[in-house]
Amino acid sequence: QCFDSMFSDDVLVSVRSSTVGIRLEESEDSADNPFAGMSDSFLYVRRDQVLDKIKLCWASGFNSESLIYRKKQGFNLLGFGVAVGVQRMVAGERSFVLFTCNPNNLSKDAVLAAGYGIGEGIVQEKVPVDHYFRNYNTGEIRREIAVKNNMRTFDTKKGYGLELRSVDESLREKPCLTDEEITEIAQIG
């Protein structure tokens, strides 16, 4: 009933999950434990698939990667839940992840990983991505441009879910983001 009051029958949604620890510091994406992506999320989900995807999200809290990580960190293996959100799906031509501090050396540079298609491929780097480093003090931008030959995007044949698709040849070696976009994103961060 809740779904029907918020969405039409033909809408596609994302069913996204995040591990939430009984102790806040044992939660996904906490300050000291940025273990994003341990629990499953699903994109371009039809209404008739939503309940099954929610159950899969809950179960994914007990996948081997998540349990091994929790054990290695000394976390309570049963001291968590999996929160699940259902959101209207927004198609993306390009996606990015922003770090407001360089995670490799803790410098005050904005770091962006960007590529073509939906964010799922970019976040998990399942597709080639460009890396941009913008210095907050000087505004200088350094680029590591990848050959972006494929992207994850909506599966038009099935009408739901994701597929791996080729990136148009004219875009493969070009930067995904302009200097203006990089600057704007970094300033928002």
Image (cartoon, helix red, strand yellow):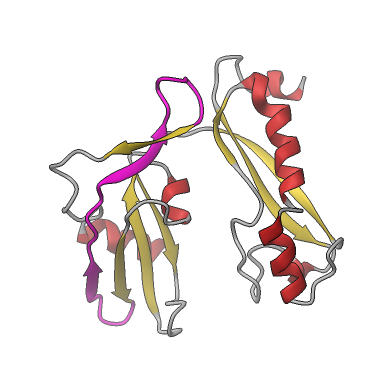
- 109, above or below 53, in the image: below
Q: Which residues are magenta?
A: 136-161
Any magenta on residue 24?
A: no
Magenta stretch, main secondary structure class:
loop
Q: Please state the horizontal and vertical placement of residue 119, each as a whole percent of the image.
A: 44, 47
Residue at (71% x, 39% y) in the render? 56
Q: Position of residue 135 (x, y in %)?
A: 31, 78
Tally the marks.
0
> Would residue 38 be found to the left or right of residue 160 on screen?
right
- Image quarter of the C terminus: bottom left
Along the horizontal axis of the image, is 139 left or right of 18? left
The residue most toward the top is 9
Estimate the x, y position of residue 70 in percent, counting from the top left. 74, 68
Q: Quadrant of residue 102?
A: bottom left
Please indicate, yes or no, whether residue 189 appears anywhere in the rendered image.
no
Residue 175 lies in quadrant: bottom left
Could you tell me which residue is drawn at 41 percent across and 20 percent down? 157
Above or below, 52 relative to 40? above
From the image, which quarter does the N terminus lie in? top right
Q: Residue at x 37, y 69 (%)?
A: 111
Say if residue 169 shows up in the picture: yes
Above or below, 68 relative to 13: below
Which residue is painted at 25% across and 81% down in the image? 138
Which residue is nearer to you in this view: 45 or 182? 45
The outermost residue toward the front is 64
From the viewer's side, name the closer residue of 155 and 96.
Answer: 155
